[in-house]
Image: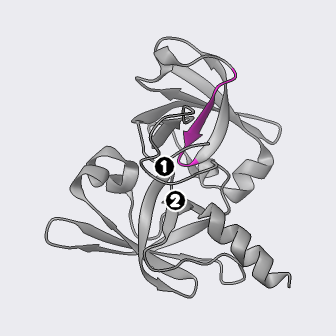
């Protein structure tokens, strides 16, 4: 379980395909604190550490994960948002995030405001997922509040701190992001659709 509060960046230093799997080596200040078998969210995707040293660690994304996320678009040098698993009893500063991506979305607009940014995303209209005004959404692992919710489209407002300390500062119109919809909202939608 995660909170959607990004702890650090990671920089992709190596990519290795093996069958349908992708081994991703990441350089990060968090590497020295990690151990094999720990869970870390990468752009919101929960992956298990399989190898680590003081500077780098490696995780493996399987074919299913690559189909449903933007991890398959990573390149050497890509910046990845990182969050270690939540400690039981710690503050929940964001919202409850599982690290299980529901789908990807495309950035369709970036508007610079007076000291902030508004990013707009469009997602699969055949999806049963929804957003609501002032509801929670996780984009590339970042816990955010929805503004301008429309059918299969929504915006988020990004403050300077979030812009500087996440990979939002790397996003361009047309880029693909990972979405994890609000856990409670997903259960309520499922209950409503199955009545």
- Which of the two residues, 111 or 193, is positioned nearer the viewer here? 193
Work out whether 195 lies above or below 29: below
Would you say the residues marked 2 and 1 are in contact, meaning their CB atoms lie under 8 Å apart?
A: yes
> How far across and down, in percent of the image, does residue 118 sit?
31, 72
Q: Residue furthest right?
A: 195
How far across and down, in percent of the image, does residue 8 sit?
Answer: 39, 35
Q: Pointer 2: residues within 10 angstroms few (<14), some, or many (20+)? A: many
173 relative to 25, above or below:
below
Q: Position of residue 76 (x, y in %)?
A: 50, 37
Q: Is residue 74 left or right of residue 16?
A: left
Give percent across and percent down for residue 138: 52, 59
Q: Is residue 64 left or right of residue 105?
A: right
Q: Does the magenta-highlighted stretch encompass residue 100?
A: no
10 Å crowding of disc 1: few (<14), some (14-19), many (20+)? many
Above/below status of 37 relative to 177:
above
Mark count: 2
Q: Secondary structure at mark 2?
A: strand
Quadrant where the N terminus lies? top right
**Toward the viewer: 177 or 156?**
156
Furthest-left residue in view? 114
Residue shown at 56% from the left, 43% from the top: 2
Label whose residue precedes the other's in the sequence (2 or 1): 1
Q: Which mark is residue 97?
A: none
Q: Which residue is mark 2?
A: 138
The disc label shown at residue 4, or none: 1
Q: Label 2 vs label 1: CA separation?
A: 7 Å
Position of the C terminus by quadrant: bottom right
Determine whether 84 is above or below 189 in the image.
Answer: above
Report the residue at 68% width, 62% height from top: 102
Please provide the residue range marked out in magenta. Answer: 37-44
Q: Indicate the secondary structure of the residue bearing disc 1.
A: loop
């Amino acid at each position: 379980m995660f909170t959607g509060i990004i702890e650090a960046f990671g920089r992709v230093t190596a990519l290795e395909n093996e069958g349908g799997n992708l081994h991703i080596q990441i350089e990060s200040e968090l590497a020295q604190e990690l151990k094999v078998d720990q869970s870390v969210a990468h752009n919101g995707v929960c992956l298990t550490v399989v190898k680590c040293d003081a500077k780098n660690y490696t995780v493996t994304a399987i074919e299913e994960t690559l189909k449903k996320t933007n991890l398959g678009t990573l390149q050497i040098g890509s910046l990845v948002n990182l969050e270690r698993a939540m400690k039981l009893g710690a503050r929940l500063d964001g919202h409850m995030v599982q690290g299980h991506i529901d789908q990807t979305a495309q950035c369709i607009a970036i508007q610079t405001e007076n000291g902030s940014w508004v990013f707009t995303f469009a997602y699969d209209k055949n999806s049963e997922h929804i957003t609501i005004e002032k509801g929670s959404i996780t984009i590339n692992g970042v816990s955010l509040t929805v503004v301008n919710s429309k059918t299969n489209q929504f915006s988020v407002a990004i403050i300077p701190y979030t812009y500087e300390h996440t990979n939002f500062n790397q996003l361009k119109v047309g880029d693909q992001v990972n979405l994890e919809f609000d856990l409670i909202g997903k259960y309520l939608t499922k209950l409503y659709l199955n009545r």
